[in-house]
Amino acid sequence: MIASGFRRMPTPQAEGTSVFGQVMRPPSTRPILRVGTFNIQSGYGLDHRTDLDRTAACIRDCDLVGLNEVAGPSFGEVRSQAQILGEKVGLAWLYAPSESRWWHDHWGNGMLTALPVQQWLRFPLHKTKPSGYRSLLLSRQEFGGKMINVLITHTDGSEDREAQLRTVIAIFRSLEEPAILMGDFNTPPGDPQLVELSRTPGVSDALESITGKWAGHHGDWIFVKGFRVLNAGVNDSGASDHPFYHCELELK
């Protein structure tokens, strides 16, 4: 019995037409979408403390955030970290676990959004070893009178990375504009698949303007099509072992 709880298991495909929580902020009057991607390392900072208030402080100004390494409910806490963060920053939330353990959703991705969500789909990515399962979250949301497609993922850092990234990029290419792809790809600049994607007509590397030690250093990326990238930034506050990357987008 204990052994079965210890074993990590992939979560099955899931879908829905709504997210959870309420947007507790006035709607923006600007036609600008503030987007961020953050591998939060379950709120565990560089000082070896878990503090989701620090995580929330990084993402508070965004309208749409993709989260990686989000912990699910635990013994003594019935909420996922996606729910906790959504409540802290006043955004609707969706927890998209990639694996289960100890008989509950254990670890995966999350999304926080101020936008109306029409539908979402979560499905597992191929994995050759029975651990460290990965998944992809696809959603359709309303912004500026249009439906936008949003992909959030966290691809593997070892032998399955290349195949998973190929799948993710193929799905992004197939989506109608406007579309956003973001997450921790565990992939540095210069990777052939990302180079080819960034050179695709109509596709922009939204974080391209970030230079220095933060430029793709941790493998976090945001690609867009059907948007103009107005600016991008990074917050390396130590709230995680990854910086928080963000950008401002405008519909073409």
Image (spheres, helix red, strand yellow):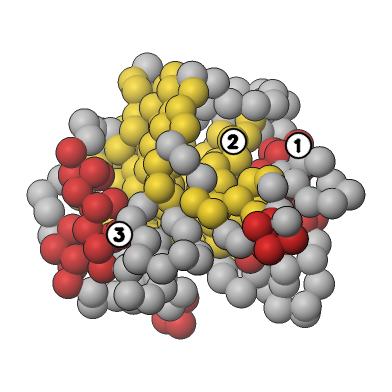
Q: Earlier in the sequence, mark 3 or mark 2?
A: 2
- The residue labelled by disc 1 is 87
Residue at point 73%, 56% (across, down): 1
Q: Which callout, 3 or 1, points to the residue nearer the camera? A: 3
* Residue found at the far front of this picture: 1
- Give the distance between the C-alpha atoms of the residues marked 3 and 2, in whole angstroms: 22 Å
Label 1 crowd bin: few (<14), some (14–19), many (20+), radius 10 Å: some
Return the x and y of residue 9 as percentages of the image width and height: 54, 54
In the image, 102: left or right of 123? right
Q: Is mark 3 on a helix, strand or loop?
A: helix
Whether residue 32 appears in this view of the structure is no
Q: Which amino acid does label 1 sit on?
A: Glu
Q: Which of 81 and 163 is in front in this view?
A: 163
Q: What element carries label 1?
A: helix
Q: Which of 102 and 53 is in front in this view?
A: 102
Residue at point 12%, 54% (across, down): 200
Q: Nearer the viewer, residue 39 or 135?
A: 135
Label 3 crowd bin: few (<14), some (14–19), many (20+), radius 10 Å: many
- Give the distance between the C-alpha atoms of the residues marked 2 and 1, in whole angstroms: 12 Å
Q: Earlier in the sequence, mark 2 or mark 1?
A: 1
Relative to 186, residue 111 above or below: above
Q: Which amino acid does label 3 sit on?
A: Gln
Q: Which of marks 3 and 1 is nearer the N terminus?
A: 1
In the image, 167: left or right of 37? left
- The residue labelled by disc 3 is 164
- Give the distance between the C-alpha atoms of the residues marked 3 and 1, in whole angstroms: 32 Å
Which label belongs to residue 94? 2
